Every structure is written in structure tokens, then in C-alpha cells.
Image: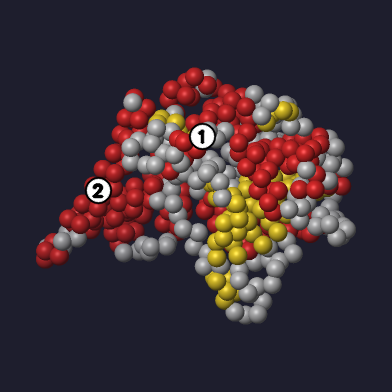
Amino acid sequence: MRYMATYDMMETLRNANQWLGATALSFASYPIFSMTPNPAFQMLAAWGEVTERTFARMVTKPDWGIRTYTCEDGKDHLVGIETIVEKPFGNLIQFAVPGRKPMKRRVLLIAPMSGHYATLLRSTVKSLLVNCEVFITDWHNARDIPVSEGKFDVEDYTLYLAEFMRALGPDTHVIAVCQPVPLALAATALLAEDEPEAQPRSLTLIGGPVDPDAAPTEVTDFGRRMTMGLLEQTMVQRVGFKYPGVGRMVYPGLMQLASFISMNGEKHAQAFSDQIANVAMGNDSDHDRHNRFYDEYLAVMDMTAEFYLSTVERIFKGLEIARNEFTVQGRKVDMGKITNVAVMTVEGGKDDISAPGQCVAALDLCTGLPDEKKASHLEPEAGHYGIFAGRSWRNNIRPLVLDFIDAHDGTGRKAPPSTKPANRNAPNRAPQSKATPV
């Protein structure tokens, strides 16, 4: 009950702040106050509006917001979301465009399970939907999954990915973003040994912790510093009575959000202060820059406790992927078994979550893969978010990823020309402007 009471207390505080915001907005917006203009009421109403929206969005899954797509025929086609594989802890979904001729590129986006919903990759999906058939992993909020569905840890996650790849077939190109990068590599290796015909054609790994020790960050330092017992005592709670997953042990989304915000507390405080001023002066809009970002950033989901703890213990502390010692159901998964899947890594020079060196380590693990099927790219000015969304993704990384996909689509076309990189294990290696075969 101690864990459940804490979970319910966090939800109570969130609910109370949402109510306070709504009350302040309603009270300060009374028409009678307009008889005596006072900026204090404007500021109170603005504070209430921003506060209510802030705390309300924390428990609301964002909408994908991808409704139409203009095809080559000049017509707007509706975009539908279809479920390809349905599982208790996550689905494989497709963004289908009825009436459009099938695209040659079939891309599976593996979204992270690290506190935010898969909708965090909305802009990535939209950019790929232009000329790809896009599929994505849509992970469920652990608070909504009954205890009767059992556990879900890193091994189960890996098996899910293998099943999704198997369902889409060998003509698929996989793009894994952030947290799932090492497990996507493991799932591919699992298929390489058990079902080679089900392997994807290419695997693009973007900013993930394959070898967390290659370039320490605040995230890896935290994982090293905290003992597993302390993590379990301080980070894990039981879902309260309000949700279907009542009693399930989770790493709560609200606690994760507090950690996210604390990393850049002053920046977030200033952003909300500025937004309150903008609302008071009437310079805001429902979809302005602040709301577009925070509607997504503040929408958090619970992770199962076993997934969170096993990720820290096995990926960060035990370095099982980095040492090629990862096991699934008691059986070792050998990354050296990958011999036909082209692998490309993408890193951001200013990534403070998965610093340069952590992701490119995947290429050294693929000992059975010929050099012509390996490539790496370092985007010098990109941070963590920028390597899969924003200007760096749109202008530089996306074209390189599509070129890499086309070069390994099974038609025998050659990869685009590029230069030999410097030592790929060096975190501060020279910037590379093109995908570089290794």
C-alpha cells in the first residue's frame, strides 16, 4: 500500500494543480472585473490558463494529427491508422494512405519506450510518409495494462520487435530511435540466427546507448551512481485505483517528467514565464511554438518497473549489449550473426543523452557484416532531438537515411560515394557530411 499511496498522491497533486489553474482562469475571467481594468486579473487568468493546460496534458495521450497527405496526383488523400499486430504492451500500426500507389520503401520506425508516447516521432513519421510506407511501434501506457497480462522487460521488448519485423517481412527497412537502438540490434541478431528470411534489409540506429561507457553523459553517470536497490525503492510505485493497471509496479510518468524537467529547470521555468506573459497580452495561440512543444513533452506514460530496472541493470550497468553478452530466455544473442542486414548509425555532435561514440559502437559488434554494409554519420550541430526531428533531420539526416535504404533495397544499386571516416570509436571525431561506409 505504501507504493500505491505514493502513486495516488502524485496524481492527487497533479489533479489539484489542474483544478487550481481552471479555478483561477474562471475567477479572473468574470465579466464584472472588466469594469475596473486591472492587469492583475489578466495575469491571474493567464496563469490559470497555462497551469490548467500544463497539468491536464500530463495524462492525455497526444493525437497523431496526421490526417491528410497530398499525393502526386495533386489530390489530398486521407491518412488512416491501421493496426497490423496487436499486443498487450504495444501495437504495430501503419499509416495507410488509401488511393496512393504502394511505395517501394517500407519503413518500420521503432519508437522509444522512455517516458513519452510514440507520437514524439510525429514529425519523423510525416517526413517519411512522403515517399515511404510507414509502420511504427505504438507502446501502451503501463498504467492501463492489467496485472493479469504479466511482466514486460527488455527481453519481452526484444521479442516484440522480432515479432513485428517478422510480421512485415524481409523487404522492411528498420529505423530505431534512441532507447530501442540496442534492443533493435539484438532483435535483428535473433532473427539472423533463427529466421534469416525474416530479417529486414537495413537497420538504421539513431542516437542509442549501444555502449553507454563509450562517452559518459549525465544519464550514464546516474545509472552508474545509483544502486539497483535504491532505484527500486525511490523510482518504482504501484499504479493507483484510478487506472486499469491498478497494482502494477511501474516507473511513473510523472516521476520521469520531474527528472526530465530538472535537467534543464531554468530553461523550462523561463519558457512558462514567457508563455504566461504572452497569454496575458493576447500573443498566444492554441498551436503556437510553446504549446506544440509542451503538449508533447509533458504527455508522459508509465513504464513497467521490470522494463525500467532491467534496462538500467543490463544495458547501462552490465553493458550486456556492448559486451555481446545479451541473453533472451536464457539464450545468448550473438550480434556477430548479422551478416546480410546493412547497418547505419547516426549520432549528434551535441547529443547530451546518447553522446557520440555510444551508438556507432554497434558497427564493431557486427563482426560478421562486411564493411560495405556498414555506415556511420555524425551530425556536428545536432542535439538528441535534432537527429530524428527538426532541421538537422529534415535537411541532412533524412536524405542520407533514404539514400542508405535505397542502396540496400535488394536491387543491387551502389551506395552514394563518400570518404573513409576517422576512428569511429573516438567520441570527438571529425564531422562527416555524408553517410560513410566503414
Q: Which residue is mark 2?
A: 19
Left or right: 409, with 45 as reference point:
right
Q: Is residue 320 above or below residue 342?
A: above
> Where residue 280 sits: x, y (%)?
28, 59
Which residue is drawn at the image coordinates 67% and 37% (left, top)?
Answer: 182
Which residue is drawn at the image coordinates 74% and 64% (left, top)?
Answer: 104
Using the rendered image of the protein, determine whether residue 43 is visible from the camera's viewpoint. Answer: no
Foreground mark, 1 or 2? 1
Q: Residues within 10 Å of mark 2 (few under 14, many from 20)?
A: some
Regarding mark 1 in the picture, which secondary structure is present there? Answer: loop
Question: Which of the pair 367/226 is nearer the observer?
Answer: 367
> Where residue 158 sits: x, y (%)?
65, 38
Which amino acid type is shown beneath numbered disc 1? Gly
Q: Is residue 82 above or below residue 378?
A: below
Question: Which of the pair 76/391 is nearer the observer?
Answer: 76
Give the colour scheme shown: secondary structure
- Outermost residue on the front side: it is 148
Which residue is drawn at the image coordinates 39% and 32% (left, top)?
Answer: 247
The answer to whether the residues at label 1 and label 2 have Cβ atoms under 8 Å apart is no
Image quarter of residue 417: bottom right
> Where residue 263 sits: x, y (%)?
47, 37
Q: Which mark is residue 150?
A: 1
